[in-house]
Amino acid sequence: MTGAELDVTVRKVDGTAVVAVAGEIDVYTSPLLQERLVEVLRDGSSSIVLDLSAVTFLDSTGLGVLITGLKRCRSAEGDLVLVTAQPNVLKVLEITGLNDVFKVHDSVDDALAT
């Protein structure tokens, strides 16, 4: 996988969309993630578990996609929950204060249990 690639897979678990992302979320790859989140919402899921466990980099453009996704989910009376234990992703969330905005879990199982 090159730096300009992002792998996004979607599966349903008990009616909740689990979107797994692998690679770098940056100015080049953010449109793909944005598109997939919109598709998931359009397909009827209002709550999304976004698994960032395999994300190696997250920039401000990626943060914008996360915030937009959260707003769209909440407008549909759902939520966007993040899953990551990646220190670099957690640090970005902490520095920006977004760890107080998003629910962040260590595992998909934990996120689905809430």
Image (cartoon, rainbow, N blue to C red):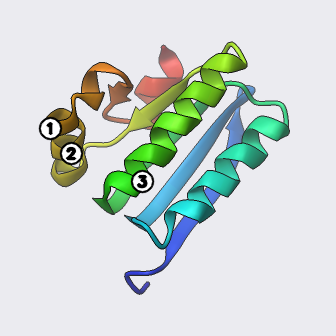
Neighbour class for label 1 at 10 Å: few (<14), some, many (≥20)?
few
112 above or below 41?
above
State the quadrant of the N terminus.
bottom left
Residue ranking furthest to the bottom:
2
Whether residue 49 is visible: no
Q: Which mark is residue 62?
A: 3
Q: Gap in Å between the C-alphas at discs 3 and 1?
A: 15 Å
Above or below for 112 versus 11: above
C-alpha span from label 2 to label 3: 11 Å
For residue 92, the mark is 2
Height in image: 16 above or below 74? below
**Picture coordinates of residue 58 (x, y %)?**
32, 57
Please report the residue visible at 45 percent of the width from the left and 64 percent of the height from the top. 22
- Would you say 78 lies left or right of 89 here? right
Can the viewer see residue 74 in this picture? Answer: yes
Going by the numbered disc 3, the residue's amino acid type is Gly
Residue 104, position as x, y percentages in the image: 34, 28
Residue type of the residue flagged with mark 1:
Ile
Residue occupied by mark 1: 95
